[in-house]
Image (tube, rainbow, N blue to C red):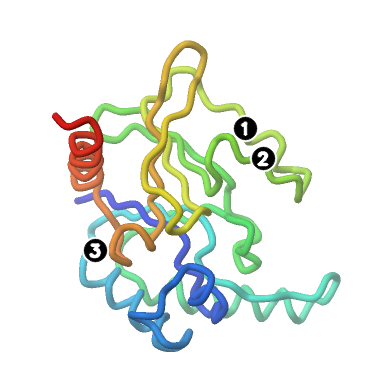
Amino acid sequence: MTIYFTADLHLHHGNIIRYAHRNPPFRNWVEMDKGLIANWNGVVANTDKVYHLGDFCYTPIQRNDKHSYEKAMRICGEAMHKVHGQAVFLRGNHDNGLQHASYYIWRRVEGMKIFMRHWPPWFHPVWPPRLIHSFEIPNDTDLILCGHIHNKWKYRVHKIGQRKVPVINVGTDVWNYRPVSITNMMDEIEKLLTAKHGR
């Protein structure tokens, strides 16, 4: 079993193509949905595990409209059944169809304590109010994974106490529109740091 990470597929979201500069390769959301799901399934086997860190499927809703919530959950559920692997979905700011998903999680992967959530650790969304409790990152965290910022950057650091902890954006826009394994992720970041510091 291989463990993969990704975020921000934004299935069904036509405007994300312009916002995240996804044209090319995608001209419309129908092409995008098919392409992103095909890319996922081309990498991930059904025996693998995938952590998706928010904004999986965009479905606008009307407040207090039961039918629009039901539609959002149905569309999201249909998309979830199309992707391979044992997927763990965290909730982002566009996940109306993931009403019961967690906003953050931590897991030990290959000896590292990894903290995952949709937003970078310094980003504090003000809505919904229940998110306020999610900002306590464990002091012994080795690596922080996030999404939300699309193609703005791939790697940063965040200070926890006296320690500087790597923060990696696992969003699909910076990983060739595919989930990425922890091994490939760390190799890529090492290359970035080597190039930056001329080592």
Placement of 79 over or under 191, stated as above or below:
below
Q: Which residue is mark 2?
A: 124
Furthest-left residue in this view: 199
- Of badges 1 and 3, the one in the foreground is 1
Gap in angstroms between the C-alphas marked 3 and 2: 32 Å
Q: Secondary structure at mark 1?
A: helix
Q: Is there a contact, CB below 8 Å, between mark 1 and mark 2?
A: yes
Res 124 → quadrant: top right
- Can you tell which mark lies on residue 135? 1
Which residue type does callout 1 highlight? Answer: Phe
Res 163 → quadrant: top left
Q: Secondary structure at mark 3?
A: loop
Placement of 37 over or under 29, stated as above or below:
above
> In this image, 131 relative to 145: left or right?
right
Relative image position of residue 167 (x, y in whole percent): 41, 36
- Can you tell which mark lies on residue 123? none
Give whichever of discs 1 and 2 has the lower sequence position: 2
The answer to whether one can see residue 77 in this image is no
